[in-house]
Amino acid sequence: MVKSIPCHSAASCFILYNQRMFLVTGGTGFIGRALLRHMFDAGHPLRTLIRPSPRTPRLPLGVPLEVAVASLNDPRGLRAALGGVDSVIHLASAEGHGNRGDLLSTDIEGTRNLAEAAADAGVKRFVYISQLGADRMSAFAVNKAKGIAEEHIRRSGVPFTILRTSIVFGPEDHFTLPLTQLLRAAPGLFPLPGGGRAVIQPLWIEDLVTCILWTFENPEMENQTYEIGGSEYFPLRQVVETIMDVNRRRRRIVPLSMPQMRALIILMDAMFPNFPFSSYSLDYFSINRTCPVDNLTRAFGLMPARFTYRLEYLRRTPWTERLSRWSTAQRKKYAEKLRERFPALRPPE
Ligand SMILES: NC(=O)c1ccc[n+]([C@@H]2O[C@H](COP(=O)([O-])OP(=O)(O)OC[C@H]3O[C@@H](n4cnc5c(N)ncnc54)[C@H](OP(=O)(O)O)[C@@H]3O)[C@@H](O)[C@H]2O)c1
């Protein structure tokens, strides 16, 4: 089923009509929402594929787009969703649902179905966001699923670009934001797997979104796989200390072994259904996750943003400032209502 959500203005509809059509899966996720906002600002016509669900989808507000509702395991639904589409960006993944997610059905079979349907529909480019360390022989479940999914895409015959990406940070992420929440809630001590020695290379969300869109501009990126990450390497411990500094909250870091950490996460997950870390997150932080720091610059000519320069979104606004913003907004709303009722109050044009 493809539903159309109307454009905001005739001008934006006109721009959208004249461009190629993109289908974005996972448009309700962290990367998907940022990508859809960016693409709308750039004037691209958009369609997003969401799965059938009784819940209201968390699509980005104020972004007019078409919504196709189909399961990744429904080849007919996928064919309908791909009608008129020439570019696909595939972000849907069960990874974020932790142990409750089904990597086999979503990441592996879902990707195979979508890539095959895209090849049949004559899609000109299929961009897949994979992960550093993706390997069909990996001992880690998510890396293994991503490795197999990549193989399905390569075999499907659809022209593809695969971006194996390091951990991504930005507003609404699954990394710095949950760490901040847990640091605020932690009672003085903060456990880290192996003391936080694993090295990571955080990538700014806007840089990733820019790279995704640039892959469509470069014909030489067809049928290529790139490994990309941010411009700096950090041990996880240093990232946590930086987040403590931003939030002005000190906690003592307690090193726990992987089995102890896994037991703690399983316990927290059982007690708090929305606990933001799963054993997949633990797998991610159990080895170094890096690629050469200049990969992104060499492939895309882009200098990635520095981690410590982009953490403003983590700062909590003081309640006085929030109250003042709220009262200004209320005053504006009230004034607007008054002007609607009494047009004579409108200032002269
Ligand atoms: N975030 C990172 O740091 C990072 C790093 C490297 C690679 N990646 C990869 O980038 C992609 C997007 O990441 P993200 O952080 O945006 O993930 P996310 O926030 O967890 O979003 C996942 C998206 O997949 C959708 N989804 C989940 N199960 C589905 C199913 N069975 N059928 C259809 N859609 C389903 C979700 O829809 P619902 O809203 O309906 O659940 C959501 O829109 C993933 O493949 C991830 O592995 C992410």
Image: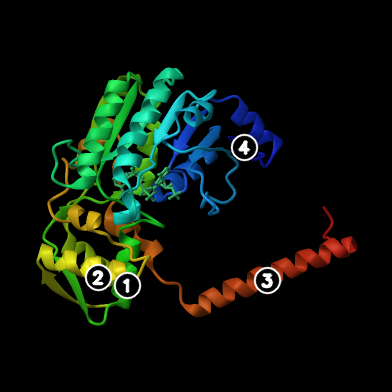
Residue, disc 3: 330
- Vertical comparison of 137 with 256: above or below: above
Badges 2 and 1: C-beta atoms under 8 Å apart?
yes
Q: Position of residue 15 (x, y in %)?
A: 61, 30
Upstream in the sequence, badge 4 or badge 1? 4
Instruction: Specify the amino acid type for callout 4.
Output: Lys
Q: Nearer the viewer, residue 103 or 235?
A: 103
**What's under tag 3, amino acid-wise?**
Gln
Within-10-Å neighbours for mark 3: few <14, some 14–19, many 20+:
few
Residue 164 place in picture, x, y as percent: 25, 38
**Percent x, y of residue 35:** 44, 42
* Most distant residue in the bottom direction: 187
Q: Amino acid at mark 1?
A: Met
Sequence-earlier tag: 4 or 2: 4
Q: Which residue occupies 41% across, 57% down?
A: 172
Instruction: Please tell me the numbered disc located at residue 295.
Output: none
* Of the two numbered discs 4 and 2 in the rendering, the one whose residue sits closer to the viewer: 2
According to the image, label 1 marks what residue? 271
The amino acid type, in three-letter code, at marker 2 is: Leu
Query: Which residue appears at 88% of the width and 60% of the height?
Result: 343
